[in-house]
Image: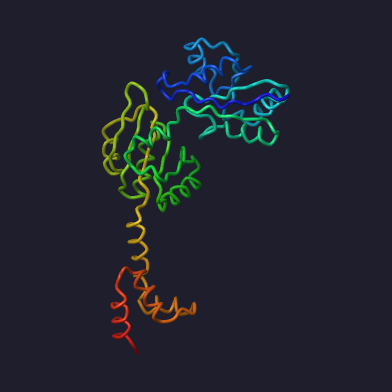
């Protein structure tokens, strides 16, 4: 009978955030697959857990996953942990989970800390709809595509960033998205936790004078419905009302209905459309 893979969430800072269920599981499984065994050893030592560990990280995620799969098939139970937070989120654990599913191996998740959710709840920005981008891609072309997509994103946006890249990322975000609201979360749950609600413009000014330290989660407001409408209306105003009418009439839409649609698109009244057409008839 095959073993089971346990996705165990570990603290993102404060060790007291670990759950009793995770501690029990880490003590009982046959093996713990850790992102960095040196880092995780500190956690195990603190809680007096002696279960054997093996490394599973970004640079061995495919080859090592095959090894772990074979151990699971042989009946071994394995716990997967990351350096901090929930495995498989912006983490090579997603590869192992996918392979387990393909092999019919049971995977279960033990909920716990996740930096993105912690930051979102502290941000003061909308939590109803949000998207998580993790770390922006290092490849310049791919990074540009992602930033261009985020420019039109209406949901709250969550990003991770390392201190040595923070200034550059804030500058890129400001240039691409404009001066939006942002909440910068630093060292979550740790002694020097900092939650800074600000704007991209103010954040850029701040870090010209202050050197970033610690790990960051950036929570950005999405493009508002009002802003989307204003931009759409501005784009329609680049063509004349007559040309705008023709676009609808070519689709077989009757003139009165076309006037109503043109007025809606441009944020003006139907009477203004009618008056323009009346004055510009040839």
Question: Residue 18, image x and y in percent?
Answer: 46, 21
Residue 63 position, x and y percent, is: 66, 29
Residue 258 in the figure: left or right of residue 91: left
Check the picture and name the quadrant holding the C terminus. bottom left
Q: Vertically, is 260 above or below 95?
A: below
Indicate the colouring scheme.
Answer: rainbow
Towards the viewer: 205 or 257: 257
Q: Nearer the viewer, residue 223 or 200?
A: 223
Quarter of the image where one finds residue 225: bottom left
Q: Quadrant of the N terminus?
A: top right
In-front residue for pair 4/150: 4
Q: Farthest residue toward the bottom?
A: 282
Q: Residue furthest front?
A: 21
Give the residue at x 66% y 35%.
101
Q: At x 43% / y 25%, what residue is drawn? A: 12
Check the image and report above or below for 274 versus 169: below
Q: In the rendered view, tell whether residue 258 sits above or below residue 139.
A: below
232, above or below 152, in the image: below
Query: Residue 201 in the image: x percent, y percent?
Result: 28, 44
Q: Residue at x 31, y 32 (%)?
A: 195
Decide if residue 77 is on the left or right side of residue 244.
Answer: right
Q: Residue at x 69, y 36 (%)?
A: 102
Residue 171 appears in which quarter of the rendering? top left
Image x and y of residue 272, in percent: 28, 77
On the picture, is 115 further left or further right than 174?
A: right
């Amino acid at each position: 009978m095959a073993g089971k893979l346990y996705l165990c969430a570990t603290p993102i800072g404060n060790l007291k955030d670990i759950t009793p269920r995770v501690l029990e599981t880490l003590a009982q499984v046959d093996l713990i697959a850790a992102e960095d065994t040196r880092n995780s050893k500190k956690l195990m030592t603190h809680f007096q857990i002696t279960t054997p560990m093996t490394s599973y990280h970004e640079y061995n995620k495919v080859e090592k996953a095959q090894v772990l799969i074979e151990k699971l098939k042989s009946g071994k139970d394995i716990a997967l942990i990351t350096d901090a937070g929930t495995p498989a989120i912006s983490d090579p654990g997603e590869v192992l989970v996918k392979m387990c599913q393909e092999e019919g191996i049971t995977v279960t998740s033990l909920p716990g800390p996740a930096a993105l959710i912690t930051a979102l709840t502290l941000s003061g920005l909308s939590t109803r709809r949000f998207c998580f981008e993790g770390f922006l891609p290092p490849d310049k072309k791919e990074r540009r595509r992602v930033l261009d997509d985020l420019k039109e994103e209406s949901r709250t946006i969550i990003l991770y960033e390392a201190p040595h890249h923070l200034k550059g990322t804030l500058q890129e975000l400001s240039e691409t998205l404009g001066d939006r609201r942002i909440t910068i979360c630093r060292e979550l749950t740790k002694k020097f936790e900092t939650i800074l609600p600000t704007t991209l413009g103010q954040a850029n000014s701040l870090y010209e004078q202050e050197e970033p330290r610690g790990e960051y989660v950036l929570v950005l407001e999405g493009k508002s419905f009002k802003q989307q409408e204003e931009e759409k209306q501005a784009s329609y105003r680049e063509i004349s009302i007559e040309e705008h009418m023709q676009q609808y009439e070519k689709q077989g839409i009757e003139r009165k209905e076309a006037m109503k649609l043109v007025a809606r698109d441009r944020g003006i009244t139907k009477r203004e459309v009618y008056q323009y057409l009346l004055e510009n008839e040839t």
